[in-house]
Amino acid sequence: MMEGWFVSHILEIFGAVTGIIYVFLEIKQKIWLWPVGIATSATYIIVFRDNGFYADMMLNVYYVVISIYGWRAWKYGKSQDDHRRGELKIRRMSLQGTLTVTVAFFLILIIMWYVLDHFTDSPVPFWDSLITSLSIVATWMLTRKILEQWHVWILANAIAVIVYICKGMYPTSILFIVYFIMAIAGLREWKKDLLRRQVEPDTDEMVSLTDK
């Protein structure tokens, strides 16, 4: 019986494992998080489609696209400190950015909730839309290395755990419990790194000044 369950959930288990690897790489700010994220998202497009979570399915399509952008942004984006081309560094969200993201979140939520409620057979249209909307804005914030993305992930993952347990998607529920714990760890790790950069001189900037 256990073997049959494992076989029938092999794709979901694979996605859960690669998803955990993805968050670990995210915490450590390793650029390889993006290709791993693409593999995870491609897997979950199928998993969520088969379970009727259409907003989450489309979210993972978005993840594939934004991961390609994020991969490039992390490697070739501008430094937030001096606008030179180079690897992105962690930064805080500005007031204007917070307002923009908040408005975007509510617009995405309302539109997605309406579509799922009226045009699909989603069993949980509001919760599906809520998790998806939070995840969309959090992923965009990740591509810019914005610290507050971890706050959004903590909220989204907490909601997701409850919803997926209620739907009997236990491997995915376990994944999101791990996501929740790792998001807390990621917030602490990124805060430490940001504080360290604030009190220590920027090595790249010192080299640049030396070369002048």
Image: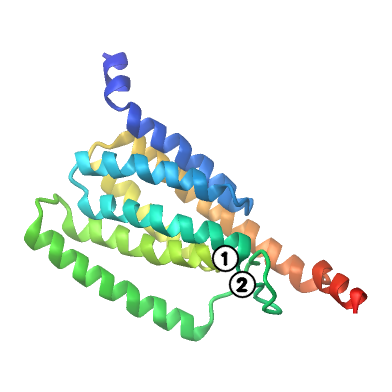
170 up-or-down from 177: above or below = above
Front residue of this view, candidates 201 and 82: 82
Q: Residue 71 sits in which quadrant?
A: bottom right
Q: How many marks?
A: 2
In the rendered image, the residue lying farthest to the left is 118
Residue type at numbered disc 2: Arg
CB atoms of marks 1 and 2 within 8 Å: yes
Say which residue label 2 marks. 91
- Viewport quadrant of the C terminus: bottom right
Question: Where is residue 160 drawn, in percent x and y?
Answer: 33, 51
Question: Where is residue 164 drawn, in percent x and y?
Answer: 28, 44
Q: Is residue 2 left or right of residue 202?
A: left
Front residue of this view, candidates 190 and 202: 202
Say which residue label 1 marks. 145
Question: Where is residue 180 drawn, in percent x and y?
Answer: 46, 50
Question: Where is residue 79 drawn, in percent x and y?
Answer: 67, 72
The numbered disc on residue 115 is none
Which residue is pictured at 72% across the width and 68% down the height? 195
Which residue is pictured at 70% across the width and 62% down the height? 193
